Amino acid sequence: MEVINKILEFELISVGQYKLRIISLLIVLIIVIVTKIILFLIKKSLFRKRKLKEFDEGNTYALYQIIKYVIWVVAFGFMLESIGVKVTILIAGSAALLVGIGLGLQQTFNDVLSGIILLSERSIKIEDILEIDGEVVKIQEIGLRTSKGLTTDDISIIIPNSLITTNKVINWSHQSKKTRFRIEVGVSYGSDVEFVIKILEESAIEHPDNTKKELTEARLVNFGNSSLDFQILFYSNNIFSSNRVKSDIRRIINQKFIENNITIPFPQMDVHLKPNTEKGN
């Protein structure tokens, strides 16, 4: 026992009155292990199957992230105390330094604050489909400073949280997993309007990703310069791959137009030249 005490009390570093002993490092290791065990138990408890429908995976993830950051901050404070660093004195002594660092890392702190807002407000959740600066992104992870997303081209991108909280962002998944999309097409003047509407609706209904076939609707929206302009509106829960769904429906429409001799006109402009009736000298 005496040998163990000597080993634990062995001084690794001795600077003035400060002494770092093996027992201090052992306490730090124990704090880290205990913190990880606590977080593991909390995670298992939060992510187990729940019957409450409103408590979905995104909300659970946000709650877990907040708990994790709080626990690690507390654990870090205990670790500093265990190796002989007084946290209160450290904060008071470095106040001026912290102000300088804060000014230099203003954008970083803005991102961190935005991350706290996202995690606590839960307006953005995991698996949500966002449109940011014209780019459609599926959110995979929300961190304290940055979030991770996947584009429709399967490219992983890192998004500063302040970009989400301060810019105009469209959340396609916020209200419902099913979203209404539209496709626009023009046909030649003289085409049978009712027949065109029928073909457009049939084309959209044929696609398997049209989740509310009874709400599919085609409209004549405008008399264009060169064409009769139509819209076909349909619902789909395949939000992330909506461009592929639209492309498939356009191909079906094009094939049906060819089969039924319906043409999509090129833009046209008629130029009338007025003859010069004046006699030359």
Image (cartoon, rainbow, N blue to C red):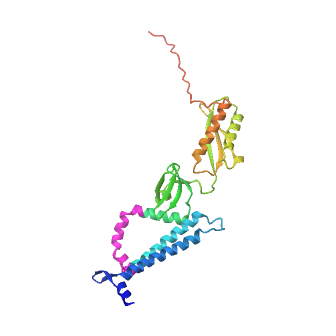
Q: Which residues are magenta?
A: 82-108
Instruction: Name the image quarter holding the C terminus.
Output: top left
Instruction: Name the image quarter holding the N terminus.
Output: bottom left
Q: Residue at x 36, y 81 (%)?
A: 22
Q: Residue at x 48, y 10 (%)?
A: 279
Q: Residue furthest bottom?
A: 2
Spot occupied by residue 62 in the image (x, y as percentages of width and height): 54, 66
Spot occupied by residue 209 in the image (x, y as percentages of width and height): 65, 48
* Vertical comparison of 226 with 65: above or below: above
Task: Determine if the magenta segment contains residue 83.
Answer: yes
Task: Determine if the magenta segment contains residue 31.
Answer: no
Q: Is residue 113 left or right of residue 258?
A: left
* Vertical comparison of 174 with 26: above or below: above
Q: Residue at x 46, y 59 (%)?
A: 162
Residue 98 falls in which quadrant of the image? bottom left
* Vertical comparison of 122 with 81: above or below: above
Along the line of sight, the residue nearer the viewer: 13 or 204: 13
* Vertical comparison of 176 with 219: above or below: below
Q: Is residue 97 left or right of residue 207?
A: left
Spot occupied by residue 53 in the image (x, y as percentages of width and height): 65, 65
